[in-house]
Image (cartoon, rainbow, N blue to C red):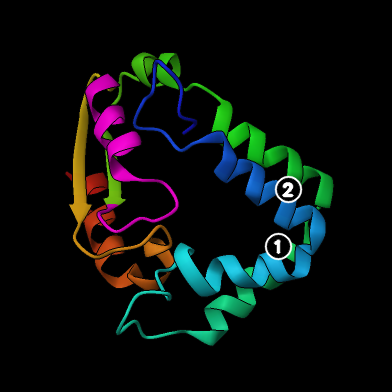
């Protein structure tokens, strides 16, 4: 996900440094702000905010290790998964929300689908990073169709 010479569409390091600063400064608030905003797209005009989803995300985050969360930011942002994707030989479905504010589609799904040997990409206009929770009915149907095909 990190913006580098090899990945110019990636996210600048300053964004991940901001995550680390927010997490270290007030972990409880970090785990409230992320789901209340960009993760589920609840910061978009007209969004239906699901308070239970936000509280559940907070609950799950607060149960985890602060150090693991901090270190996890480095792992998910700086690990180059190119070779791993190239090595996958089974049919693979890549799902991505077109309004994902957390993992931009250009820097992830559009690249991943080019690296997979037998990949199929399905995108969803207006869907967020948390689409598997807030749009489960539609995505579960697509997942079931893929695994039974």
Q: Which residue is mark 1?
A: 61
Considering only vertical position in the picture, is 69 above or below 25?
above
Q: Position of residue 24 (x, y in %)?
A: 80, 53
Element under label 1?
helix
Q: CA distance from mark 1 to mark 2?
A: 8 Å
Instruction: Identify which residue is drawn at 68% across, 64% down.
Output: 30
The quadrant in which residue 125 appears is bottom left
Q: Nearer the viewer, residue 100 or 15?
A: 15
Q: State the image coordinates of residue 32 (x, y, percent, origin top left).
A: 65, 72
User: What are the residue bounds of the magenta stretch?
Assistant: 97-115
Q: Is residue 125 left or right of residue 143?
A: left
- Left or right placement of residue 73 versus residue 87 in this view: right
Residue drawn at (71%, 47%), measured in percent from left and top? 20
Q: Position of residue 140 (x, y in %)?
A: 31, 62
Instruction: Establish if 149 lies above or below 57.
Output: above
Q: Are marks 1 and 2 in contact (CB under 8 Å)?
A: yes
Q: Nearer the viewer, residue 91 or 21?
A: 21
Q: Nearer the viewer, residue 122 or 129?
A: 129
Instruction: Please identify the residue farthest to the front as the structure is shown.
Output: 14
In the picture of the structure, the residue carrying the numbered disc 2 is: 69
Image point (77%, 62%), residue name? 27
Q: Is residue 135 magenta?
A: no
Local crowd size for mark 2, using a 10 Å CA cut-off: few (<14), some (14–19), many (≥20): some
The answer to whether 89 is drawn above or below residue 48 in the figure is above
Mark 1 or mark 2, which has the lower sequence index? 1
Between 71 and 63, the one lying in front of the other is: 71
Residue 78 coordinates in the image, percent (x, y)? 57, 28
- Disc 2 element: helix
């Amino acid at each position: 996900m990190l913006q580098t010479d090899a990945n110019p569409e990636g996210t600048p390091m300053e964004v991940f440094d901001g995550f680390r600063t927010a997490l270290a400064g007030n972990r409880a608030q970090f785990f409230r702000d992320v789901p209340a905003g960009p993760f589920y797209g609840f910061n978009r005009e007209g969004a239906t905010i699901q308070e239970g989803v936000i509280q559940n995300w907070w609950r799950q985050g607060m149960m985890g290790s602060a150090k693991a969360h901090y270190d996890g930011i480095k792992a998910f942002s700086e690990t180059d998964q190119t070779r791993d994707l190239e090595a996958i030989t089974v049919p693979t479905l890549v799902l991505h929300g077109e309004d994902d504010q957390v993992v931009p589609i250009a820097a992830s799904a559009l690249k991943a689908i080019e690296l997979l040997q037998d990949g199929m990409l399905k995108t969803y206009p207006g869907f967020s990073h948390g689409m598997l929770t807030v749009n489960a009915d539609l995505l579960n149907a697509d997942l079931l169709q893929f695994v039974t095909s």
